[in-house]
Amino acid sequence: MENINWYPGHMKKTRELIQKNLKLVDVCVEVLDARIPVSSRNPILAELTQSKTRIIVLNKSDLADEAKTAAWAEKLQADGSRVLVMNCNSGAGCSALLRLLEKVRDEKNEGRERQKDLRLMIVGIPNVGKSSLINRLTGKKAAKTGNKPGVTRGKQWISLGEHMMMLDTPGILWPKFEDPKVGLNLAFCGSIKDEIMDLETLGMELIGVLAKDYPDLLSARYKLDDIAETPLENMENVARKRGFILPGKRIDYERTARTVIDEFRSGTIGRITLE
């Protein structure tokens, strides 16, 4: 699959928005997808926010390989980041994040006669769960949510109470993915709109990754007798097991691809980490 080059105008505006408002915030909370902690970490955001206190949230931990998530959290902490493993849909980890933010707030107000609000910015690429995190922190539907990238469009200041204010920003990707694997990982997890991808090729690529790294989960989910040598053969075997056959005994590659992609994203196949 060719390198993906996708940089809509609103993402350029988001970069400018982040740069403009950085001087207003004390803390940047960067939300990553626990299944792809490298691919979902935008190097532009790292560059823009390096002067701020940073907290990394490994979200969607319920969909990721638990042992690998623990290893990633340990590695990121060893690199000097404050890391929390979370599932923003269920709220797991939100109390720990609030306690950490309160600690940072108190440290910044130490010695002050008058308390200042802690101002934080939520950043991350599309579809990693920023809006779900905001709604969990505020306890209400304060920000729009969706299962497709590009739902959050503008700047929102949201009060968390307890002398804390939060600035939400839309997701921002980077202009070009030099490593094709990064683009694939983002596409697998839904951070790139499906409409710009070749769905059948994407599904076959995902099946290839699962056959290599999680063959037992792939076999169990689709009742495969064994793992074939090529992604195409495995894709066709999945189609036959599911009955995705068109007239003339032709394989329905599109339906097969959509099924495997959807079931990976929902965690139906199992807890999977791609990095």
Image (tube, rainbow, N blue to C red):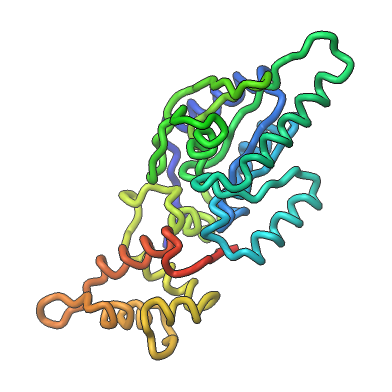
Is residue 181 or residue 128 the one in the foreground?
128
> Quadrant location of residue 229?
bottom left
Judge whether 166 appears above or below 39 on screen: above
Is residue 191 or residue 272 the one in the foreground?
272
Q: Where is residue 254 in the image (x, y as percent from the top left)?
A: 26, 66
Q: Which image quarter holds the N terminus? A: bottom left
Please give the name of the residue rendered at 68% of the width and 47% of the height, measured from the top-left corner: 84
Q: In this image, 202 relative to 87: left or right?
A: left
Kindly give the residue lying farthest to the right in the view shown.
111
Q: Where is residue 42 in the image (x, y as percent from the top left)?
A: 59, 43
Kindly give the residue lying farthest to the left in the view shown.
247
Is residue 140 or residue 265 the one in the foreground?
140
Please give the name of the residue rendered at 46% of the width and 55% of the height, measured from the top-left corner: 189
Please give the name of the residue rendered at 48% of the width and 76% of the height, measured from the top-left corner: 217
Please give the name of the residue rendered at 42% of the width and 48% of the height, measured from the top-left corner: 192
Q: Position of residue 27 (x, y in %)?
A: 70, 29
